[in-house]
Image (cartoon, grey):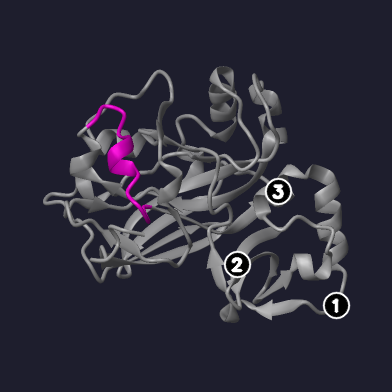
Amino acid sequence: MKLATFSHSGRARVGLVHDDQVLDLVAAEPELPTTLLELIAGGPDAIALVKRAAARTGYRLALRDVQLLAPIPRPGKVLAIGVNYADHIAEMGREKPEHPTVFNKQITCVTGPHAPIHLPRVSSALDYECELAFVIGRRCRHVPKERAREVIAGYCAMNDVTVRDWQVHSPTWTIGKSFDTHGPLGPWLTTADSVQDPHALGLRTFVNGEPRQNSNTRNLVFNCFDLVAYLSTAFTLEPGDVISTGTPGGVAAAMKPPKWLVAGDVVRVEIDQLGVLENKVIAEPADSALL
């Protein structure tokens, strides 16, 4: 199943995407939660209601008539993994890590699959990073790798947009990874039971149609199940937490000279079975200081 958060007539809703339509789930089944985070936290009972709603006629909208939002607009955590593909490790001149390189992206960076990416006022070193992300579906701690699949609600694409000069302001990387709009996520959540093998998915990035990244999740150093086991050893994972698994080679920072993103660029991130993010880079709006 493809579960989406979308806006229609000025209101955010939860939907089930099929082909070029989206089913308004709460309209079809009023017992369902009104947010996707609450829906996945509802577990099998909520999924059973989704399946019941899917069998009903009506309550469907054309995808072209709605605005897709980030599936989980405000996750409890956004955790990301650095240097997790061999080709990216090589192009950045790093050593293969012994343990996952974990950093936080602040939750306010999360934005929709077609929303604009801001070129910051304070930097021109703006970079893209195509990544497989997964969303936690069950509150969990100390999950063995063999059972990690059980706590993943589903998968989606993420663009771990990075302000490279600000990234090195701090060893934690968080500041350069967390600018507003620098976490496009989506286009929807493909449930785990619909993805036979999350570690056999092609992923690609294009900038204005020019190929920049082309790899496969089989090349992850630490895969999704490794990451669940590692992270849950330290702290509790909760429904709606987003873990972004790292980017392959081909980032702008590794080019000579770097091909930084500029206003007007369109960044397209594709992951097999999961869909497409397509975001236009715009100058950071002048009126964005006071919200």
Quarter occupied by the N terminus: bottom right
Say which of 273 and 20 sits in front.
20
Q: Position of residue 265 (x, y in %)?
A: 27, 68
- Vertical placement of residue 161 versus 238, above or below: below
**Of the two numbered discs 3 and 1 in the rendering, the one whose residue sits closer to the viewer:** 3
Q: Position of residue 133 (x, y in %)?
A: 52, 45
Q: Please state if 118 lies on the left or on the right of 151 as rendered.
A: left
Q: Specify which label sits upstream in the sequence, 3 or 2.
A: 2
Query: Of the numbered discs in the image, which one, if any, rests on residue 38?
Result: 3
**How far separated are the C-alphas under marks 3 and 1?**
24 Å
Q: Please state if 256 lies on the left or on the right of 68 as rendered.
A: left
Amino acid type, callout 2: Phe
Q: Is residue 3 visible?
A: yes
The residue to which callout 1 is attached is 57
Q: Specify which label sits upstream in the sequence, 2 or 1.
A: 2
Quarter occupied by the C terminus: bottom left
- Using the rendered view, name the quadrant where residue 190 is placed: bottom right
**What span is colored magenta in the figure?**
170-182
**Residue at (54, 25) in percent of width and height:** 231
Q: Position of residue 256 (x, y in %)?
A: 13, 49
Which element is circle 3 on?
A: helix
**Of the two numbered discs 2 and 1 in the rendering, the one whose residue sits closer to the viewer:** 2
**How far separated are the C-alphas under marks 3 and 2?**
15 Å
The residue to which callout 2 is attached is 6
Q: Is residue 171 magenta?
A: yes
**Residue at (38, 48) in percent of width and height:** 160
Query: Of the numbered discs in the image, which one, if any, rests on residue 101?
Result: none
